[in-house]
Image (spheres, coloured by chain):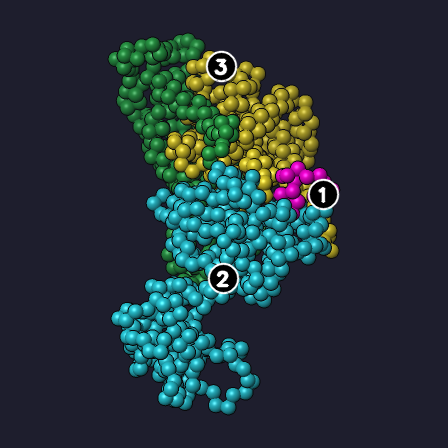
Chain colours: A cyan, B green, C yellow
Amino acid sequence: MRRTFAPWADPDAKPLIRFENVTKRFGEAMAVDHLSLDIFEGEFFCLLGPSGCGKTTLMRMLAGFEFPSEGVITLAGLSLEGVPPYRRPVNMMFQSYALFPHMSVEKNIAFGLKQDGLPKSEISDRVGEMLRLVQLEKLAKRYPSQLSGGQRQRVALARALAKRPKVLLLDEPLGALDKKLREETQFELMDIQHELGMTFVVVTHDQEEAMTMADRIAVMDHGRIVQVATPGEIYEQPKTRFIAEFVGDVNILEGHVMGQENGLWHVKTASAEVPLTIDDPDEVLHSGQAVAIAVRPEKMVVQREKPGPEAVNVLTGEVWDIGYLGDWTVYRIMLATGEILRVSCANVSRFVESPIDWDEQVYVTFAPGAAVILAE
Amino acid sequence: MKERSFTKRLTAGLVPAVPYLWLGVFFLVPFLIVLKISLSDPAVAQPPYKPVFEWSDIAGFFSALDLENFELLTQDDLYLRATLSSVRIAALSTVLLLLVGFPIAYGMARAPERHRSLLVALVILPFWTSFLIRIYAWIAILKPEGLLTQALMGIGLISEPIEILNTEWAVYIGIVYAYLPFMVLPLYATLEKMDDTLLEAALDLGSTPWRSFWTITVPLAMPGIIAGSLLCFIPAVGEFVIPDLLGGSETLMIGRQLWSEFFSNRDWPLASAVAILLLIILVVPIVIYRDVEARRVETRP
Amino acid sequence: MNRRLSLFNVTSLVLGFAFLYLPILLLVIYSFNASRLVTVWGGFSTQWYGALFRNEALIEAAWVTLRIALLSASLATVLGTLAALALTRYGRFTGRTLFTGMIYAPMVMPEVITGLSLLLFFVAIDLDRGFWTVTLAHTTLTMCFVTVVVQSRLMTFDRSLEEAAMDLGAPPLRTFFSVTLPLIAPSIVAGFLLAFTLSLDDLVIASFNTGPGATTLPIKIYSQVRLGLSPEINAASTILIGLVTLGVISATLISKRSAMRSRRAIA
């Protein structure tokens, strides 16, 4: 996520890709539901959502393997209606890599260039360039069956980049890799995208992937876009309960708005004895309203000692579970209502004298600004 | 896709159209002709039948329908007996094929992976030698002075030559021998794909190997069993060569009847009627076979 | 998969293959039998091989059979592959049920029926029986087997490979020839070999549809079987078995060597 790069904020900027009211039906089922979206040049864009949300269908429509039932997709101002996939300046890196098993690595990468009828010398130059980009120069003559999973993925990437498309689509690019490799590859992809200045559109169900790599994320559910924003905005300002729960872990507290005091609102909830105090920067609250608020686990503090009298947002409960993750510790705390709160703390010191243990009675607090008011 | 030009749609349409037309002309139309001929009278002519049907006279056709041949079929009990015996022999042969073929297919499926393609090749290899010659070899084995008798006498099991050739038993042996690859290969294909962990789960839950075989392996192999059985039973009903070479004069099979009506008696209409009769018997199994196979194609993994 | 062979498995395999190969073994042995009779071993002799090559009628029949088999198998392979493509790629089209029926029925239909029906057809259209009618008949029958073989490969074919090719700029026809065809080629070859064998071996359909000058080898053999077979036929079969075994061995060796070569290229 680059903080200074934000073409979507510029009112004069023209999008590279525009989906206008796009709908896709398969028989009775609606995979994509009147969806509109702008993607700008140079973005690392992620389509995020659970399986079945329509993200893959949306990508396939951009690639040209499906055609919209309604609506228009434009690329660089030109409509893509009726344009078959082999005529689009869009290339795709497939989830299964789809490397041609009967062709060597070189020939795989050269395939797209051959279709354009480029002269042989130019093709071999470009292939060499791509091999250097993904660091596979030594494996040029091998066949896909002789490569490891990670190597195959690089070939797939090199093949898709060889034609220097305007847009590169990546379908669950990191799914088949193990954890270590996944992390490395994430950063590599970001570096390559930045170096080439291309527009990447990634489809994934893994929110960690999306958060790490994307400039902007579009969260999808049931064929619609629920929120399009930067990872920071998605994480700290989720619009809906669905997004709050889908991206990262979250605690959701429900209650009724009572009234204002000193610019902060009081919310009566069953989860705590004393009403909560929260901030309302967008001014959406009014008295008597039913409201759900979200608080991220790392924004909560758990302690053994009773907080002082001026403390706000105090919840009491019993330690139900402790998950020691090395760098973090996650506590699951059961409140009197039976709800379970999730609180995480970074393990900042190597040795703790008497750490919080199972079944202890503890107090959990959070700041008024840590609460996010959810729209639904 | 909107941009598909006329030529593109034409070439795309050719792919199903060409084989469709071919089969329509060379498979479907001939059957209609067989039906038509079966309703004709024989004639001493070339071709030896009097056409009942002129294309210009459809009304006259229906009024002059000659069911003589079919009446003959139902009156002479030779055809009834031949039909029953054909179905019986084919059915029993199919059962024997299952009993012989299943252990072979099972053994092949359980063999180490690197040997499996060799085993499949070994099953197919006999195909490459002339079918007739292999049946002929069985004549040499099964005839009264043949090798089987010599071997059994040599061991001392029998004292007199054994009479197998020219009996129904020789036909059974011949059909099982000839059709074995058609039973083994579909069975093997199904058994090879079977998930071993299912058997392991059954054993883990307390089922004996014998019980697991009947409650897990056999039901899962059922598609292969059905395909293999139909692939053997249906053509076996109309089999000609094996009963002709190995069976005796009392081995009645309807394929032989058809052949002799056609080649010996030169009665084409009657032969056609026999063909229609055979078709009627087999239409249900053929449709079942088509359904089983078509469903296998349509359900993608 | 970790499978082990039980004693039962091994026994059934050994017995099964012995049963399959016994007559073939006999054929080969008796092709070298100096005596004509099967029951008597007259000593080792290659006289029948010499007699075979002097038997013009037999050689002529073999040549006819070979030509018919090559022609019908080639045609059947093209038609059968088209049919397989139609079945697996064209979803629901009008008349699909009839189409599949016409594909699977000839495979199981007794040959006496298909032979007779095709003959009556040729008579009806006034086509002289002979080389071409047998070829057409064989094509019709064997194309169905080709379809089944190719179709089973197409079903396991990874469609995303075709999508990748199109994504990289190859229009549908070019995609088919550079990606699909090379990968299904082994099954097309297998289909061709199957069609070739079926045509080579067929007696019934050839008998119904043949004419003067088009006597196939099976027809010739059948006519002689009733009179008592000459060991020249044994010699012919032994040669054929030898050729096929040679072919299978060399094919396996070639594929093993190319696998080794590519492995060496990496090292």
- Give left or right: position of C152 versus A124: left
Picture coordinates of residue A257 (x, y %)?
29, 73
Q: Residue at x 48, y 37 (%)?
A: A82
Name the residue carrying label 2. A230
Secondary structure found at label 1: helix
- Which chain hosts label 2? A
**Residue C215: which disc?**
none
Q: Nearer the viewer, mark 2 or mark 1?
A: 2
Disc 2 and disc 1: Cα gap in Å?
39 Å
The magenta segment is A108-123
Mark carried by residue A122: 1
Q: Position of residue A318 (x, y in %)?
A: 36, 83
In the image, what residue occupies the spot 34% across and 9% down? B56
Question: Callout 1: few (<14), some (14-19), or many (20+) C-alpha neighbours within 10 Å?
Answer: few
Residue that mark 3 sits on? C127
Number of on-image labels: 3
Snapshot quadrant of residue B91: top left
Front tag of 3 and 1: 1
- Identify the amino acid type marked 3: Leu
Query: Local crowd at mark 3 within 10 Å, few (<14), some, or many (≥20)?
Result: few
